[in-house]
């Protein structure tokens, strides 16, 4: 198959709403070398191109298949950052323009890491196992006293930022969200992280540089940092830039890097472990992982925006609550509770538990509504409509005035269905998938709605529909 054929296949897959039909169509062609290559490049979260593809329409006559030198050479150079900046922009624009329309659009979708046909990496791996590596982090559940089997436990601040994993390998560091989205805006920190890992490796390689450290410990750290395969590591943490809203804005800006963001790191695991989709647990206790991380962070170059999160020890549930209360009083979101002997497991569970002050839910935006007649927002955007287990919930609180005005200026450009009235408000439903919003509320009402819902933040970092996006 060539690029025109592959694009037609994607169109056909996207046109069906049946998951089984999508799987059957993909299964029939997945072993074709061009299809396989396209899927691999578009969905592998560890392959990124460092560029937002320009909106250039193909006006040429060229197409490509798996044997064509281009555009594969260009994609390889972009992924290895051998082609960057204006040179990358110029090369991509030229390539998109030289290709015929279908091939040009296919290449643009590869660069965007989104084939726009309604399939996920899970579907791909179901059709052909191990085609695409998945990206999974250790995630927490709500705090429950009964889950703690022994004291003491570690208690850590729950920061109000973006959780992310920095993958360091082959002299490059790339930052990913919890669902595998690449954060190119944080790649500016890559040189610091690379230098930090390389400095740590150089130090443990020389016994004289680590007085008092046993050969066994030096060898263990060496292996965590890539061993004989070369410098690498996976460093887990939270990116924070002032308030969450500031952090969110920094990380969403496409034209500049979030250079005022601090990386608050709290864990480290081998890079090879993160890349191995068949291995979900690294059987090394948190206490040892933190010691390794502390050693590595001390090797960061001067001025590096990297700090370790503070860990305090609690010997009872009362002490946990006291530390949590301190964190809240200091303006933090809450606390994380972690057993010292807990392993790093790439899934959601009670090994890590979070304590937060309010009830919140991450809900999908499905539309918006106008303010009521006679109010300041009459005829203007007054809030979003979200879906809570099939119930429409109007979220009208939590927005800043400037945010309301900004949304009002753009929301009407989003495709929406006809207006209707609900709860005395003029409402419109989007015709496309909306963003994921964190909503704070007091309680769930008997009819399944939410009492006093208010906007807290956008949760693009948790949005599965954005998985492996550029």
Image (cartoon, rainbow, N blue to C red):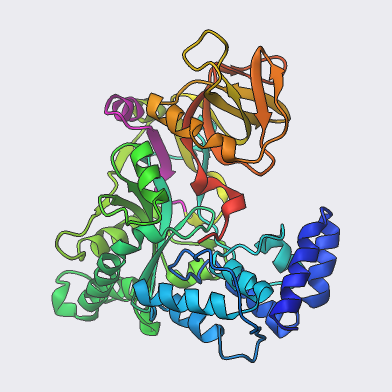
Asked whether 386 or 426 is in front, the reply is 426
The picture quadrant where one finds residue 98 is bottom right
Residue 144: x, y in percent?
52, 31
Residue at position x 16%, y 59% in the image: 303
**Residue 102 place in picture, x, y as percent:** 68, 73
| 289 to 328, vertically: above or below | below
Task: Give the residue at the far front of this rendering.
Answer: 59
Locate residue 247, reporting x and y percent: 35, 43
Q: Position of residue 203 (x, y in %)?
A: 20, 75
Is 389 situated left or right of 199 in this image?
right
For residue 130, say whether it is visible: no
Magenta-drawn segment:
322-342
Residue 426 lies, with reference to residue 303, above or below; the image says above
Q: Is residue 131 magenta?
A: no
Report if residue 212 is visible in the image.
yes
Quadrant occupied by the N terminus = bottom right
Q: Nearer the viewer, residue 322 or 368?
A: 368
Q: On the rendered structure, is 6 left or right of 343?
A: right
Q: Residue at x 66, y 24 (%)?
A: 427
Q: Is residue 3 left or right of residue 455?
A: right
State the residue at coordinates (35%, 63%): 187
């Amino acid at each position: 198959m060539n690029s025109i054929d592959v694009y037609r296949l994607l169109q056909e897959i996207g046109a069906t709403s049946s998951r089984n039909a999508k799987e059957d169509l993909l299964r029939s062609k997945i072993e074709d070398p061009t299809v396989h290559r396209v899927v691999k490049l578009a969905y592998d979260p560890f392959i990124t191109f460092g560029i937002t593809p320009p909106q250039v329409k193909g006006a040429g006559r060229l197409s490509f298949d798996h044997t064509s030198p281009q555009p594969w050479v260009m994609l390889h150079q972009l992924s290895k950052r051998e082609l960057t900046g204006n040179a990358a922009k110029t090369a991509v624009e030229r390539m998109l323009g030289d290709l015929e329309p279908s091939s040009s659009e296919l290449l643009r979708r590869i660069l965007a890491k989104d084939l726009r046909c309604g399939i996920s990496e899970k579907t791909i791996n179901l059709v052909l196992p191990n085609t695409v590596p998945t990206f999974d982090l250790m995630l927490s559940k709500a705090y429950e006293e009964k889950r703690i089997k022994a004291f003491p436990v570690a208690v850590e601040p729950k920061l109000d930022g973006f959780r992310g994993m920095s993958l360091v390998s082959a002299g490059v560091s790339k930052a990913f969200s919890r669902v595998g989205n690449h954060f190119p805006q944080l790649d500016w920190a890559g040189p610091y992280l690379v230098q930090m890992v390389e400095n740590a490796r150089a130090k443990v390689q020389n016994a004289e540089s680590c007085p008092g450290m046993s050969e066994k410990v030096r060898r263990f750290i060496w292996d965590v940092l890539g061993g004989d395969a070369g410098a690498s590591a996976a460093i887990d943490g939270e990116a924070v830039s002032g308030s969450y809203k500031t952090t969110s804005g920094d990380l969403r800006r496409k034209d500049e890097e979030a250079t005022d963001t601090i990386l608050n790191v709290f864990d480290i695991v081998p890079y090879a472990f993160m890349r191995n989709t068949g291995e979900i647990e690294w059987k090394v206790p948190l206490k040892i992982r933190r010691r390794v991380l502390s050693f590595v962070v001390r090797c960061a170059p001067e001025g590096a925006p990297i700090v370790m999160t503070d860990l305090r020890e609690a010997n009872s549930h009362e002490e946990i609550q006291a530390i949590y209360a301190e964190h809240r009083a200091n303006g933090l979101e809450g606390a994380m509770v972690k057993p010292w002997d807990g392993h790093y497991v790439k899934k959601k569970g009670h090994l890590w538990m979070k304590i937060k002050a309010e009830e919140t839910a991450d809900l999908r935006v499905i539309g918006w509504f106008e303010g009521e007649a006679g109010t300041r927002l009459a005829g203007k955007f007054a809030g979003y409509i979200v879906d809570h287990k099939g119930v429409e919930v109007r979220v009208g609180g939590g927005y800043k005035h400037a945010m309301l005005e900004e949304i009002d200026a753009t929301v009407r450009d989003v495709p929406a269905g006809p207006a209707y009235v609900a709860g005395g408000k003029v409402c419109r439903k989007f015709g496309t998938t909306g963003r994921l919003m964190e909503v704070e509320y007091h309680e769930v009402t008997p009819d399944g709605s939410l009492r006093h819902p208010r906007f807290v933040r956008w949760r693009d970092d948790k949005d599965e529909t954005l998985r492996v996006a550029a």
